[in-house]
Image (spheres, rainbow, N blue to C red):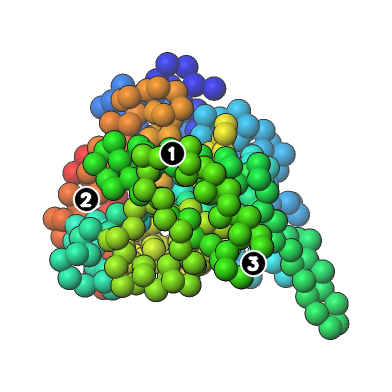
Amino acid sequence: MSANNAFHIAVLAGDGIGPEVMAPALELLRNVGAKSGLSFRFTDAAAGANNYLATGKSMPDSTIRLCEEADAILLGACGLPSVRYPDNTEIAPQIELRFHFDLYAGVRPARLIPGVPSPIVGADARGIDLVLIRESTEGLFASMGKGVVTQEDARETMVITRKTSERLFEFSFRLAERRKARGKPGALACVDKANVFRAFAFFRGLFDEAAARHPDVKADRLYVDACAAMLVKRPWDFDVMVTENMFGDILSDLTASLIGGLGMAPSADIGDRYAVFQPCHGTAPDIMGQGKANPTGMILSAAMMLDWLADKHGVESAAEAAEDIERAVDRAYADGLKPTEFGGRNGTADIARAVLAAL
């Protein structure tokens, strides 16, 4: 584990464009580390569809051991549409890591960066700065690999437990409190379908119990369908949201689209002890090896890792380094950076150089 300001990072570059976006993120971490008095030891590990093709496993046992020993885990992107398990599901070590390490809080920030186009137009769009927290170990995903399929029907089971929900809500309220201390609204909305399903009524009841313990946070309750409609009309009204696994899976892609798409969106899966940081996008095999992949989501995920390490180990310089990376990304885009997915000419190398220069 970490010693002073030195951190050991497990690096799972994965498949497709995963290694392409990982390289600039590591370069930025080395650079900001040198400026901030931080040092990093990066250890590469195998994971993903290509490893499955070679060995029959999504991850070797050595990768799991490395992740257990490291201070944090950086993941590029894993899985390929053409490579599947016998039950026809994709190779997804990122999901397997969530279950193995009990990473119950999936943190998906969505902040519109200056110069980045959004489908939401108008001056208010500049105010899109929210965080979706997705429970990541149960909900409908608790049924992964356990569904029952017959000739007549198919059944999956949603699971919501008190233990996980209480930890999830405590995490969410603490995040809202930290954002309030930084000048954000500090409001938290529970997103569910409590008007139809008993499981979600139970979920909302546990949220209400947590809200009573955090009276300084404005607590709201929203049905998921109404929430989706509000997000595409007035996303700047949201601060922090917390929801079940499947709802979060869907809404996090929606919120990423509001800020320029999955290439711009970072994420983290966080538990009581371990955490994995990765961009929201997939492996994009259609552009693999062409130098077009946008590394911004990966770079901002690395910044999230620094912020988490700062909080976990009390290293303020790591939090400052995270802010330095975010400001560098903002400056690079404000100065005219335009990735290929926005119709521009800036590919992976251009984006990496621009952010490094702004740093």
Residue behind mark 1: 214
- In the rendered image, the residue lying farthest to the top is 4
Residue located at (29% from left, 54% from top): 129
Quadrant for residue 83, please give it.
bottom right
Q: Looking at numbered disc 1 in the image, what kind of residue is underneath it? A: His
Residue 24 visible, this orientation: no
> Is 33 left or right of 198, judged from the image as shown?
left
**Viewer-nearest residue: 44 or 204:** 204
- Image coordinates of residue 35 in percent, x first then y, are 26, 27
Q: Looking at numbered disc 2 in the image, what kind of residue is underneath it? A: Asp
Measure the C-alpha gap from mark 3 to mark 1: 26 Å
Residue located at (64% from left, 67% from top): 197
Residue 330 visible, this orientation: yes
- Image coordinates of residue 208 in percent, x first then y, are 52, 48
Residue located at (41% from left, 29% from top): 311
User: Quarter of the image containing the C terminus?
Assistant: top left
What secondary structure is found at the residue carrying circle 1?
loop
**Viewer-nearest residue: 346 or 145:** 145
- In the rendered image, the residue lying farthest to the bottom is 152
- In the rendered image, the residue lying farthest to the right is 151
What secondary structure is found at the residue carrying circle 2?
helix
Residue behind mark 2: 330
- Image coordinates of residue 139 in percent, x first then y, are 64, 57
Graded by Cα atoms within 10 Å as few (under 14), some (14 to 19) or many (20 or more), the crowding at tag 2 reads some
Residue behind mark 3: 197
